[in-house]
Every structure is written in C-alpha cells, then in structure tokens.
Image (cartoon, rainbow, N blue to C red):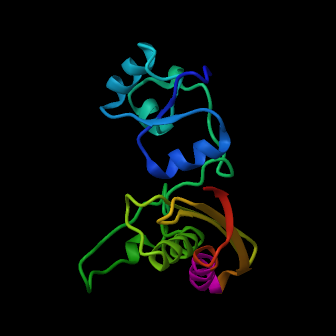
Amino acid sequence: MDPSRPIGCASARRAVQLRALFPGVAVAPVRGNVLTRLRKLDEGQFSALVLAAAGLKRLGLEERITRYFTVEELLPAAGQGILALQTRAGEELSCLDGVLDADGTDCARAERAFVRALDGGCSAPIAAHARLEGDTVTIDGLYVTDAGEVRRGRLSGPRAQGEALGEALARRLKEGGTCLEK
C-alpha cells in the first residue's frame, strides 16, 4: 500500500477504524458503484479500497479481493449479516421453527441495544459485535463522540442479560471508555 495515496472508504464507521489500523495513511471518501470505485483505484486515486467482499463476489470480482479484515480489526455494524423476517401480526409462524436462530437473535438484540442506547441510526459511526460462548455473551462496541473521539470497549456477562450488557457498554463508552483516536 502506497502511504502517499489514501485508502478509499465509503463508510464513516469503517474509516475511523482504518485510521487506527493504518496510522499515517489517509482515509478518503469514495463514491460510485463498485465498478466506478475500482476504476478510481486502477487510475491511482487510491492506494487501496475497502469494499464489502460479498458485493465483489456477487459481481464475480472475487479476484480483486486482496485482504479480508477480521472482526477485531473492523467491527461491523450492529446486526451485520443477520436476516430478519417481518410478518403481519397474528400470522401462523410455526413453519419458521426450523430456521429461527436463537443464538443470532440474542446477539442481534445485544448489538441493537448498544446502538439504541447511543441514539444511533444506520449511518452513524457506531459498530457492535456480540458473540456467545456457552451461556456467556460478549459484546464489543465502538462509537465516535461529537468531538471526534473514537471509543471502543467490551463487556461480557450472562446471555440472558445481553440487552442490558449492550446498554451498559454504551453508557460506559459515553462516560469515557477506551479512546482509540482523537
């Protein structure tokens, strides 16, 4: 990666994390569809691009992927990768019993509680990732303060308290938390 050219990224959430991962390398916004963004990379406007691997694979461009980030490197948006089904009230849903994922549901609830406690929307630079190990849920969260500080933290506790843990982590980060960047 050429440090004289920026990393292109369209997500504020990813951009703040990339700055922490690659200090000294600029991160700049990139717009356009995937092919337009790749053309900008090929023209030398960026040293690298951060794009969703699923989108590149769907377009048959998997060979353009040079690196996958771990969850520890780039925390995802809350609920990333979760599929949800919305139905009318009173509908018979027993046909879905075989596809319901209680683990995924509990993790999603903890992540959404974190975002809700921060009053975050889908475009806010907020990230959350919950995971289960037995009856313990661990949630990692990140958010950017109004002053531009990037705060990141982790809490673990009983699975049944996942939503409360998400809310508690949000409060802790609001009160100070671990500051990654100012």
The x and y percentages for residue 70 are 66, 45
Query: Residue 159's image quarter?
Result: bottom right
Asked whether residue 85 is in view, the answer is yes
x 51%, y 28%: residue: 6
The x and y percentages for residue 89 are 25, 84
x 45%, y 23%: residue: 61
Question: Dividing the image into 4 quarters, which one contains the C terminus?
Answer: bottom right
Q: Is residue 73 above or below residue 132?
A: above
x 49%, y 57%: residue: 80
Q: Is residue 163 magenta?
A: yes
Residue furthest toward the left? 88
Magenta stretch in the rendered image: 161-171
Asked whether residue 136 is in view, the answer is no
Question: Dividing the image into 4 quarters, which one contains the N terminus?
Answer: top right
The x and y percentages for residue 13 are 49, 52
Q: Work out whether residue 113 or residue 107 is closer to the camera in this orientation and state it.
A: 113
- What secondary structure is the stretch in magenta mostly built from? helix
